[in-house]
Image: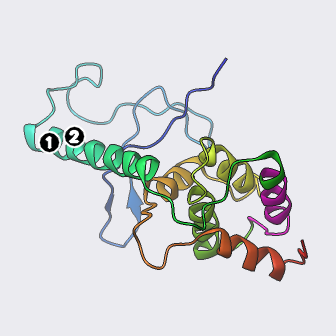
Amino acid sequence: MHKKKEITVLEFRCGTADGLTVQDVLPPSMHPDTGMPYRWGGKGDWRQIPEIPAALLAAWQQELVARQASRAQRKDRQWSLSRIEDTPRQRARIADMLSHISADCSYILYRDIVWAILSLGWHDEEDIAKAWCLSAPEKFEEDDFWNVVNSYDPNHYPAPTIGTIIFRARAGGWNG
């Protein structure tokens, strides 16, 4: 059975006057600290949500189209001579290199390694990237991971590549 990937498509957040973030939560969601269910505090009935305003629907649809186009572009891109072939030997080599790079790292390094994995062009590149990220489970956030994946642009210069993985793995003690 395949597990469905859940991602945040779009979040609208706002802040309070003193700079704190806020969000809407609907019953019967549970408060993470108290363990008590949230109660409805607004007007109307949360079970009878009004029709979405056309402008908000259009913004959501535009964001969805942009993300789908980005993913399609990534899948359809042409490969240069530096493309790494998807072979058992290369997979073992990449796995060995990634084992020398801690996912408990700065955001920039995390992003660059995920993007470098995505640059491989393998059919399961997202799964490989996620497995590496999960090697630091205390830092892993599903939404953050998918935001990094969905922001990958192979045309961004300089784009992280296998060279990024090699460089960081050598810095971590890899000598393959």
Any part of residue 92 in sight: yes
- At mark 1, the secondary structure is helix
Q: CA distance from mark 2 to mark 1?
A: 5 Å
Secondary structure, mark 2, is helix
**Residue drawn where x is 48% and y is 41% of the image:** 7
* Label 1 Cα crowd, 10 Å radius (few <14 / some 14-19 / many 20+): few
Q: Amino acid at mark 2?
A: Gln
Q: Quadrant of the N terminus?
A: top right
- Residue 124 drawn at (x, y percent): 63, 42
Which mark is drawn over residue 85? none
Residue 26 percent across, percent down from the top left: 39, 32
- On whether residue 61 falls in the magenta region, the answer is no
Q: Left or right of 20: which side holds 85?
A: right
Q: Is residue 10 visible?
A: no
Residue 96: say if magenta.
yes
> Range of the magenta residues?
91-103
Find residue 102 and report its horizontal and vertical position in percent. 79, 68
Q: Residue furthest left?
A: 54
Cβ–Cβ below 8 Å for labels 2 and 1?
A: yes
Q: Determine which of the numbered discs, if any, sits on residue 61 in the image.
A: 2
41 displayed left or right of 165: left
Q: Judge by depth and name the residue closer to the eye, 46 or 10.
A: 10
Compare residues 44 and 56 and report the one nearer the observer.
56
Question: Image quadrant for the C terminus?
Answer: bottom right
Q: What label does residue 58 carry, if any?
A: 1
